Amino acid sequence: MEAAAYHSLRDLQDRHWWFVGRRAIVARLIRTFARLPERPRILEAGCGYGGNLAMLAQFGDIDAFELDDDARAYASLRTPRQVAPGLLPDRIGFEGERFDLIAMLDVLEHVEDDHGALVALRQRLGVDGSILITVPALPWLWSAHDAIHHHHRRYTRAGLDRLLRQAGYAPASIGYFNGLLFPLAMAQRLAARLTRAAGKPDTMPGPWLNRLLGGVFRLERHLVGRIGLPIGLSLYAVARPARQ
């Protein structure tokens, strides 16, 4: 990811409507689909600047790893446990450890070997553990935003399902989210293509717009996993190790 784009995540992750809304949706998915024991162990794979750690810590004891040194140091200030260095798929640490939940939130699209990454994480899941993934959806929505964030791909629902099964998982639920704002996003991307606008790091919208967009996005936490959205800018998946 380009440095300016990555640093923008640090500045926006606590207040920007998209990050706040995604955390609300992820929390609902955990409550709905994750089979957590009384004292679960949770791992965030690629935690960035740590914006999700407090939310995940509500559900259990949290560990995390992150490649970028600056992000790892910043994230370590937000959690009782030091964030470990790690690189998917083959240098993620935690050998021999087992987690009840692994969260991989908009990380898989950055990994060239996405299949290898999922296999490596499955080896760190308990028998009844769950992995929760979010990724950008629909390859035909590829834009300059994907390029500056160094995405390797966007996913289809069928493609994500197939990838998980090939990596040894049994999907419990896969679906779209960020669908209520889909028409607005489509109009914005069409305008960018027509004007050939270059991709820019994310910025904070004005307070009233941030509240409005955040309110619409957070409404989806009542829909995901219950009423399947027909389309959306993002996909989620909750999966467990397949029984042999």
Image (tube, grey):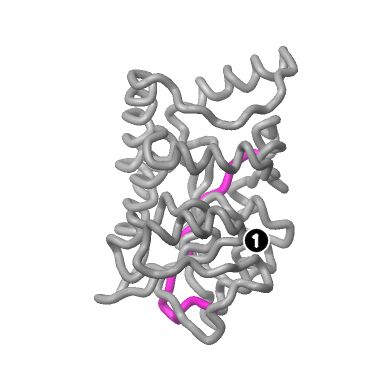
> For this view, does 60 lie left or right of residue 129?
left
Helix or strand or loop: what does disc 1 sit on?
helix
Q: Nearer the viewer, residue 238 or 51?
A: 51
Identify the residue at the far left of this view: 38
**Is residue 159 depicted above or below 97 in this figure?**
above
Residue 67 image position (x, y, % from top left): 61, 61
Q: Nearer the viewer, residue 6 or 225?
A: 6
Residue 174 image position (x, y, % from top left): 49, 53
Total numbered labels placed on residues in the image: 1
Residue 234 image position (x, y, % from top left): 53, 41
Would you say residue 95 sits in the magenta stretch? no
Quadrant assignment for the C terminus: bottom right
Disc 1 residue type? Answer: Leu
Identified at 46% across, 27% down, the residue is 204
Q: To which residue does mark 1 refer?
A: 163
Q: Residues within 10 Å of mark 1 (few under 14, many from 20)?
A: some
Q: Nearer the viewer, residue 157 or 131?
A: 131
Quadrant assignment for the N terminus: top right
Would you say residue 130 sits in the magenta stretch? yes
Image: magenta residue range: 124-138
> For this view, does 244 lie left or right of residue 140?
left
Q: Is residue 133 visible?
A: no
Q: Main secondary structure of the magenta part?
A: strand
Residue 69 image position (x, y, % from top left): 59, 59
> For this view, does 55 lie left or right of residue 199?
left
Q: Is residue 8 visible?
A: yes
Quadrant housing residue 221: top left
Quadrant housing residue 115: bottom right
**Is residue 205 depicted above or below 66 in this figure?**
above
Identified at 72% across, 13% down, the residue is 194
